[in-house]
Image: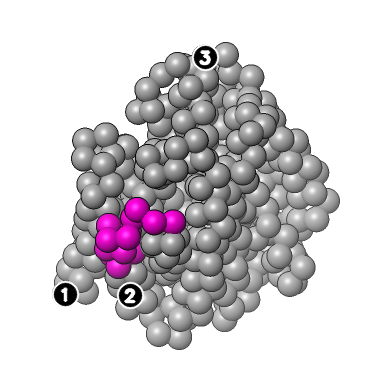
């Protein structure tokens, strides 16, 4: 609790007087201090990918971590679960601050804190301390979700879906390439991977301090008021609840596949599992193309219809993974379809909820992404459990079940 309080003090300094919790208007464009150039948009996409990558370096390294601490694979997988739980907590506690204070400072500060957290991970002497360090690292790795509303506020309203889609493409590339980098770099040792990542985050914090324009919120608020308003916002917006559920089920399906994949490859390719995860990660980068495509189609056709199509891709991916899951080609095709489906649905969800108002986008992101990563933690747990109980067929069945649950809720929402 002392550590959490120190983090919050570093992020939140100036108290504010009054705030209206449910102002849904777009807010003045003056709050966006600079136009969104193509160069700045490219840097935002890169920064989103570079920071989110820290959450996923562990997945190809789980077998190595288990061997390092002499624990079972199921215990090592708690590293992924702890990271995602910490991330979900950070989304709820830190991301809402963007609606009440200057956003550039928030982004730069959290990026610097990520670098420090990664040092703690690299130096962890045993599994319990590693889990605590990963929990803290997840807590402060909120930069990607601070960048999405930051980008949405900078972008012209007619091109907001495309801008958000491009940043989300960078985020997805970061997720997938992180697995590839840690998979191919596994020979360095898992501690070295995190030490290198810490240095990269320090450089990113310096670059963000230099390149990002300042962006003040249109209203002032205390941290307590912002957190209190989350309950009101969740109760009043059924559209937010719907798309948060869809996102959670999609990300649960995503992690149901990716978390136990290194163990599946350990059976197929003994001694080469981490590198095989890396290869699959590079193949899956093609799924990043779905993000800008989903943003454009959501603007033209409608977010909900596109969402159903992308969730269908997730179901198809697991059918392929079930039928051809003993070959690298089959897994690569399934991974690309899975990444495309989950990412397309994710962008569609965010495009939809951002129509609720410009002054509350950080809180919308906080509620949506907290639910999203809670679903991811559930998927990691279910995927590991399914692998231990019934191996690959159970993993594929569990992932498909999450996607089908999302589709059922989407169609029920349409009928209502």
> Along the horizontal axis of the image, is 377 left or right of 273?
left
- Residue 95 pos. (x, y %): 53, 45
- Residue 120 pos. (x, y %): 63, 23
- Residue 165 pos. (x, y %): 55, 69
- Residue 63 pos. (x, y %): 46, 31
- Front-lying residue, 182 or 151: 182
Can residue 197 be seen from the camera position used here? Answer: yes
Reading the image, the residue beneath label 3 is 126
Q: Secondary structure at mark 3?
A: loop
**Looking at the image, is mark 2 or mark 1 earlier in the sequence?**
2
Can residue 94 be seen from the camera position used here? Answer: no
**Looking at the image, is mark 3 or mark 2 earlier in the sequence?**
3
Quadrant, the C terminus? bottom left
Q: Is residue 234 magenta?
A: no
Which label belongs to residue 309? 2
Reading the image, the residue beneath label 1 is 415
> What secondary structure characterizes most of the magenta part?
helix
Q: Residues within 10 Å of mark 1 (few under 14, many from 20)?
A: few
Spatial CA span between label 3 and label 2: 44 Å
Spatial CA span between label 2 and label 1: 17 Å
Magenta part of the chain:
315-328
> Along the horizontal axis of the image, is 111 left or right of 137?
right
Spatial CA span between label 1 and label 3: 52 Å
Please name the residue shown 78% across and 42% down the image. Answer: 203
- Front-lying residue, 87 or 396: 396
Q: Secondary structure at mark 2?
A: helix
- Front-lying residue, 372 or 286: 286
Q: Quadrant of residue 402?
A: bottom left
Q: Quadrant of residue 170?
A: bottom right
Please name the residue shown 65% across and 60% down the image. Answer: 45
- Front-lying residue, 219 or 104: 104
Nearer to us of marks 2 and 1 is 2
């Amino acid at each position: 609790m002392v550590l959490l309080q120190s983090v919050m003090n570093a992020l939140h300094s100036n108290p504010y007087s009054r705030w209206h919790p449910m102002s849904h208007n777009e807010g003045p464009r003056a709050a966006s201090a600079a136009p969104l150039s193509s160069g700045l948009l490219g840097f935002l996409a890169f920064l989103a990918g570079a920071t989110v990558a820290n959450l996923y370096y562990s997945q190809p390294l789980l077998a190595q971590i288990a061997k390092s601490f002499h624990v079972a694979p199921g215990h090592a997988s708690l590293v992924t679960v702890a990271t995602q739980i910490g991330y979900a907590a950070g989304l709820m506690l830190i991301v809402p601050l963007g609606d009440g204070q200057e956003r550039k400072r928030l982004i730069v500060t959290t990026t610097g804190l990520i670098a420090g957290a990664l040092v703690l991970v690299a130096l962890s002497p045993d599994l319990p301390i590693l889990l605590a360090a990963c929990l803290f690292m997840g807590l402060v790795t909120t930069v990607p979700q601070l960048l999405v509303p930051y980008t949405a506020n900078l972008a012209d309203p007619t091109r907001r879906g495309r801008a958000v889609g491009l940043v989300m493409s960078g985020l997805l590339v970061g997720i997938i390439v992180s697995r590839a980098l840690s998979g191919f770099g596994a020979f360095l040792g898992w501690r070295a991977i995190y030490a290198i990542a810490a240095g990269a985050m320090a450089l990113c914090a310096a670059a963000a301090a230099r390149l990002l324009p300042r962006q003040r919120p249109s209203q002032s608020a205390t941290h307590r008021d912002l957190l209190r308003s989350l309950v009101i916002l969740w109760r009043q917006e059924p559209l937010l609840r719907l798309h948060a559920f869809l996102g959670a089920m999609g990300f649960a399906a995503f992690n149901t596949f990716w978390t136990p994949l290194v163990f599946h490859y350990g059976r197929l390719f003994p001694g080469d599992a981490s590198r095989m995860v890396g290869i699959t990660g590079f193949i899956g980068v093609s799924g990043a193309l779905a993000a800008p495509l989903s943003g454009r189609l959501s603007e033209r056709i409608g977010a909900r219809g596109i969402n159903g199509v992308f969730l269908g891709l997730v179901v198809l991916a697991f059918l392929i993974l079930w039928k051809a899951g003993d070959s690298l080609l089959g897994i690569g095709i399934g991974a690309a379809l899975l990444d495309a489906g989950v990412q397309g649905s994710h962008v569609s969800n965010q495009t939809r909820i951002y129509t609720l108002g410009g002054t509350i986008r950080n809180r919308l992101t906080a509620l949506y992404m907290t639910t999203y990563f809670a679903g991811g933690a559930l998927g990691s747990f279910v995927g590991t459990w399914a692998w231990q109980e019934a191996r690959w067929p159970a993993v594929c069945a569990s992932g498909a079940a999450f996607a089908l649950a999302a589709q059922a809720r989407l169609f029920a929402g349409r009928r209502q």
